[in-house]
Image: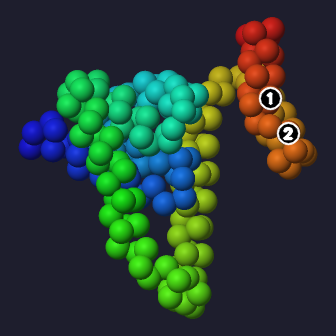
Amino acid sequence: MGTALQLFISFFLIGFGAYGGGLVTIPLIQHEIVVNQQWLTFEQMASLLAIAQMTPGPIAVNTATFVGFQINGVLGAAIATLAVILPAILILIWLAPFVDRISHNLYVLKIRKGIQLGVLSLILYATWSYSAIAIEGWLDLLLGITAFAVLVAFEGKLHPIFVILACGVVGLLFF
């Protein structure tokens, strides 16, 4: 199978499974890009995710563009980016005419509830996987827990960018 086709299939699968947003794509990206295709190491993926989260746009699109470019240049970037957004476009085109009719359907609501729990498991798995790289000692763990506690304590009243910047300052002072 050619590299372009592998890029398309891998990122199409990531895009198809991205129900729930950016954090959900992290385990999907890890499985497809690190485990299946072995295009990146886990450490490279962690660095890529940090960059993808800091740049504007969805994590999956940023990652697709970067990995596609690394694997097959500008053509690879275009193929991977198209592949990761294509499932959402196709699903929207297919479901849009029916949303009003099915949104309150009991079976659809039950399926959504199950999917939400599956999405939660992916977010928790992403946290677990990423923490293995980010947390190297007790100080790292303490900073992560403190930042999380601050976010929870302020429940949306504090912009997350302030927590990130504060952690950066703490990192500058203590690491």
Q: For this view, does 29 lie left or right of residue 170? A: left
Residue at the (52%, 25%) spot, across then down: 51
Residue 39 visible in this rendered orientation of the protein: no
Q: Which percent across, then down, holds residue 41?
A: 38, 28
Q: For this view, does 125 lie left or right of residue 34? A: right
Q: For this view, does 14 lie left or right of residue 73? A: right
Residue, far right = 153
Residue at the (53%, 83%) spot, across then down: 100
Q: Which percent across, then down, holds residue 116?
A: 58, 67
Q: In which quadrant of the rendered image does the N terminus lie?
A: top left
* Vertical order, 103 against 55 (above or below): below
* Residue topped by disc 2: 158
Judging from the image, what secondary structure is the residue with disc 1 in? helix
Q: Which percent across, then down, holds residue 23?
A: 56, 47
* Residue topped by disc 1: 162
Residue 87 visible in this rendered orientation of the protein: yes
Q: Quadrant of residue 81?
A: top left
Q: In which quadrant of the rendered image does the C terminus lie?
A: top right
Few, some or many residues within 10 Å of mark 1 (<14, 14–19, 20+) = few
Asked if the residue under mark 2 is in contact with the one under mark 1, i.e. CB atoms within 8 Å, the reply is yes
Q: Quadrant of residue 130?
A: top right
* Vertical order, 153 against 52 (above or below): below
